[in-house]
Structure formats: C-alpha cells, structure tokens
Image: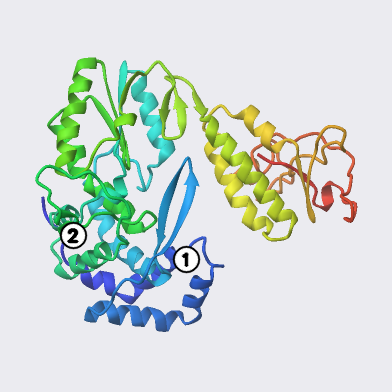
Amino acid sequence: MKRLGGVWPRLVAFENLFGAYRRARRGKRTRPDVQNFALRLESNLFTLQRELEDGSYRPGAYRLFTVYERKPRLIAAAPFRDRVVHHALMQCIEPTIDRRFIRDSYACRAGKGVHAAVDRYQQWARRYAYVLKLDISRYFPSIDHRILKETLRRHLKDQRVLALLDRIIDGAPPGSESQPPFPGDDLLTPLERPRGIPIGNLTSQFFANLYLDGFDHWLLETRRVPAYLRYVDDLYILGDDLAELWATRAACDEYLAGLRLRLHPRKVRVQRTSEAVDVLGLRVSRQRRWLRNDNGYRFRRRFRDLLRLYREGRIEWADLLPGVQGWIGHARHAETLGLRLAIFGPVAFYRDGWYIVGRGSAPPLAGCCAAVPGTTTQGTRASRTATGTLPTTATKGSVCGWPSLPAWPSVPLPGTPAVGAAGGVARGCP
C-alpha cells in the first residue's frame, strides 16, 4: 500500500485554512466562540498558520459535557480554533484514505449514513437467513493510542502531518473509567498505553473508521463472510450457515483483542432476518421498517421542551425548526404516519406563540403551513413553466411534505392579536 506524502504544504496553505474555517463554522455562526474568532479572522488564521509551520501549535483544553440519549455519553468539545485545524487536516488526508475503506462502512462518510446502511441491510436480509449482530464495548474510550498511531503511519509518510496527528491524539482528555486488563498487562500498562479519543471531534470520527479498517478487510478477504456492514462500532454479519456465524463471532473476539477491544457481551446475538431486527435505531424486517418506541418518546419530550422555550421567548423559530425537521427526516424512513400525527397534529403555531389543541378547547387552527411559490414537497423545488415562471401554488402537499389540513376559524391566544392563515398561523407540520 502506497503511503500518502506531500500533504504538509497543502495543509498549512492559507486557502486551506480559510476553507476549513468556513466548514467549521457551518451551522454554528451565532456561537460566541465562532463570532470571536471571526471578529479578527485574518489575524487568527495567519497566527494559526504560523504556529503550524514553526511547530508551536498545541491543542487547547476540551469542554466536557454529558448528553443523555438512551445512555449517558461524555462529549468533549474542542475550542473553535482547534476545530479549524481538524477540518484543515481532514480536507487533505481523508479523501485519499477514505477510498481505501470497504464499501460497506457507513459512518461519517460522504454518500453514506444511517439510512444507506439500513437500505443495504434490508437488501441483504431478503437474501440471507440469519444476521449476527456485534457491538464493541466502549469503543471510543477504548481506542489504544499506540495502535492508532501505528495505523496512521501505514497510510501517511509526511512526518510533520504525523506529528500534528500525534499531538491531537495525545491531547485527548483521559478516560475516567478503568477497564479489565488484557493478557500481558501489568500495573503500569494504563500509564504506558494511554487510550481513548473524544466523542465529538471530526478527527475522532475519522480515527474510528480507520482503527477498524484492517478488521473490516480481514472479515471480507480472510474470513470471506458473505455480507458485512459496519457503522462505527455496530457490526452486522449476514449468512445462511448458523454454525459458521457463531464461529465468526469467536474469531472476531480474538482479532479485536489484538486491537485491545472487547465485544459487548449483552449485545452479541444471532437473529433470523425474517424477524424485526434492531438496526441503527430502526426495527427492520425484510420488507418493513418501524421506529423504535424509545425514539418517539424521547422526541415527544424534547419537542414539548422546545415548545415551552419558544413560548417563553428563550429560543426563536429558527432555533426550534432544525431539530424538529431533522427528526422528521429520520422518522419518515419508517412507518411513522400515526406517530407524527399524534405528536404534531394537536400543535398550532402562532407568529407570537403556540397552542396545543386538547379536548374541550378551540379547534385546530388553519391548515398546515401553506406551500410557498416554487415549492412542492420538503426540500424540492417546483419546475418552471414554459414562460420561465414558478407556479403560484403547490399541488403535491405543503412545504414540509405533509398533506394540508383543513382550515378552521382563527382563535387567538389570550393577549395576542387575532390572525388568520395569511397572518402566520400554522398547524403543526410534521
């Protein structure tokens, strides 16, 4: 395998750093650290360029916080200037190395993602009788720094790029939980072999794909499994021979021990593909898909919290909409029509607030947000007419891709002016 060289001049070029800044700020322009960096943008980029060139650049301290989605996860957020460096680095090395990954590794790669992985699984489920599901226990906190650095050196030969990658790896916050030792370890091993990369870094996503790339190729080229896909630390191996799948499980355990990783003992199972199998947050059979129950419950709670913050004036409509639309985009890949009606149907939005329609209360207000000229369904544009103009009304649904609901007389909230459909009343739009 030819190693990648000549990366450093491209990495420290001002044009690359400016492009990295634009990528790093995407969706985060209103954050104070981004605005402070942008306030003296040219000076900050030249300072960063000088530090990289003379070797004085050092990563800053991480901001640690915990998110709770099914289980608590410790997230480490790097300072914005470090995120600019991460993007500059990935722009130069990721495209070339990414082409060496297997086709069916779906996490954090262009043109891949959760829904592409589910499509691929469902395609294979129609062909094979069984699926072996594997999950690596505490994957990000378990990644061994020494093994990761050796893996990077098999792909890169530019010493200054490798030194920068080493500083990013060594700058990761230390793991807080102890893990059982591997054969041959002693009391000093945790000090001699640091482990763990932060969840949340752009570089960590790349490292997570790279760390198991050899394992991916081993499964396909040495073990010759019939069908295999991976999404970070979730592994799915399909086949018709049940005994061979269990033998593959034992071989995987042995191989991963060489990477100082362990399979999660309670998340290893073999299932028939004719059953509803939990695949990346969806329950998937050969022909159908359902959203997992806990996903709907979590979103309903989060949505009510967002509505409360919106009514109190603590967030704007632009803050509320992206998270809602993101969940809708995911949920529409499964059979969730009833769930979306249950969550969004009773909610009416005013220009100055929102209203939940309940028993004995006013009827739903107005129709679902009316389509604006030039739109048909969510994320699409209407075709221009022969005269080059856009149609004035939508014919296939509303802007959000949801069928318009019947209009009702406008009922104002106490203390708010009466407004009709043209005045900004919109019923909940899944």
Whether residue 110 is visible, yes or no, is yes
Q: Nearer the viewer, mark 2 or mark 1?
A: 2
Q: Nearer the viewer, residue 321 or 42?
A: 321
Whether residue 241 is visible, yes or no, is no
x and y percentages locating residue 371 in the rendered image: 71, 44
The residue indicated by pointer 1 is: 25
Give the CA distance from mark 2 to mark 1: 36 Å
- The kind of secondary structure element at disc 1 is loop
x and y percentages locating residue 270 in the rendered image: 31, 21
| Contact between labelled residues 1 and 2, with CB atoms less than 8 Å apart | no
Which numbered dot is residue 191?
2
Q: Nearer the viewer, residue 367 or 315?
A: 315
Side of 24 relative to 35 (left or right): left
Label 2: few (<14), some (14–19) or many (≥20) C-alpha neighbours in 10 Å: few
Give the residue displayed 36% in from the left and 48% down from the top: 108
> Which amino acid lies under the numbered mark 1 shown in the image of this protein?
Arg
Q: Is residue 56 above or below residue 106?
A: below
Give the residue displayed 51% in from the left and 63% down from the top: 28
Give the residue displayed 49% in from the left and 43% down from the top: 69
Q: Quadrant of the C terminus?
A: top right
Residue 174 lies in quadrant: bottom left
- The kind of secondary structure element at disc 2 is helix
> Which amino acid lies under the numbered mark 2 shown in the image of this protein?
Leu
Q: Is residue 208 above or below residue 83?
A: above
Label 1: few (<14), some (14–19) or many (≥20) C-alpha neighbours in 10 Å: some
Q: Earlier in the sequence, mark 2 or mark 1?
A: 1
Residue 280 lies in quadrant: top left
Give the residue displayed 28% in from the left and 80% down from the top: 51
